[in-house]
Amino acid sequence: MLEAVISGIIIIGFVIALSNLVFFQEPAPNLSEKGYAILKELENTGKLRDYVSSENFTGLQSEINIPGYAYSIEICDSQGTCNGNRPVGKNVWLSSYIIAGDGDYEPKVIKLYIWREE
Amino acid sequence: MKGQYFIMASIILCSLVFLSLPAFYKSTQYISSDFKYILHNIESEFPHSLNLGLERDMPIETLSNFTLFVRGALKEKFLHARFLWMVSLMQPDGSVKIYVGNFLDEDCEVNLVVEGVSRNTVLSDGEVFSETFPSLPEKFYASLEFKGKEKEIEWLRDKTNLYLYAELSRNTDVAVKEIEA
């Protein structure tokens, strides 16, 4: 009888632990998508191409605000030359936006790295 | 002694359920969430690259270069990007030149039919095929067959037209988008 109660407690405990894991786990924030939305919004307002073609990192950074998170920007051209800061470490979300150019054909990738502030 | 079997059975049952969790998660995972916005980016920027190419009288070279640039840039995100496009350009003599570019990362047999005139060729990766059609009506019909797909389009003769097939894949996730501009 006692063994049956113990096995019942094991199963109930396991189900409760599992349901906490599956149903009540806080979803991981999708910061890659948020980063893209930020870059897309800058593109929609016509600011992204201006800042990128002139490599105005200060201007670009002044347009971005992600509360609770740190970020850095890197711009790479078709030769693979990159300017800006690439963070070192784990748990960094990367959002990138590709542009063909601004007036002249000059393809570039804008990379927005986002990570949790320490 | 008999009761201890209950405890053992419950432990085995819980262990089996726990071990099967990774398979459950694998079967319910969604397509990589970044596909949606990358395809959105592609949709807006490929026509833009063609326009920039037209401004410097090198539309096909520019589009080819941009296609390779995008493919390389997406590799960094562990994405395998494959493209195939078709462009129509009106020439100064009134004829229309149609270009088909294969960037599917493999050889591809394409069959182009424009107003009943058919052209068939095999394109290697990065190769662009072109055909001139001397007299097309103001609105003309083109169809393109490749990789078992068939795309039928109605285009305006006097306008530069673009059809783009874009396919993104990462592991088992695949997303496809067709763009017309």
Image (cartoon, coloured by chain):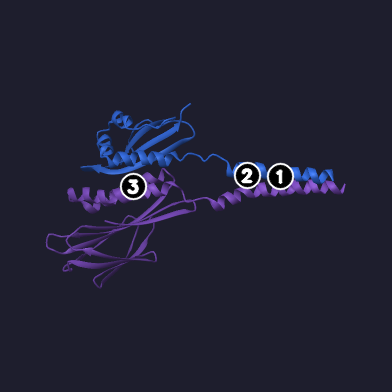
Proximity of marks 1 and 2: CB atoms separated by less than 8 Å? no
Q: Say which chain tag 3 marks.
A: B
Q: Say which chain tag 2 marks.
A: A
- The answer to which quarter of the image holds residue B98 is bottom left
Q: Is residue B121 above or below residue A20?
A: below
Q: Residue furthest right?
A: B1
Question: As shown in the figure, which amino acid type bears the numbered disc 2?
Answer: Ser
Q: Position of residue A75 (x, y in %)?
A: 33, 36
Q: Position of residue B62 (x, y in %)?
A: 25, 49
Q: Which mark is residue A12?
A: 1
Report the mark closest to the observer, 3 or 1. Answer: 1
Q: Label 3, on which residue?
A: B41
- Residue at 77% over, 49% down: B9
Left or right side of A39 for B99: left
Q: Label 2, on which residue?
A: A19
Tell me, what hue is chain B?
purple
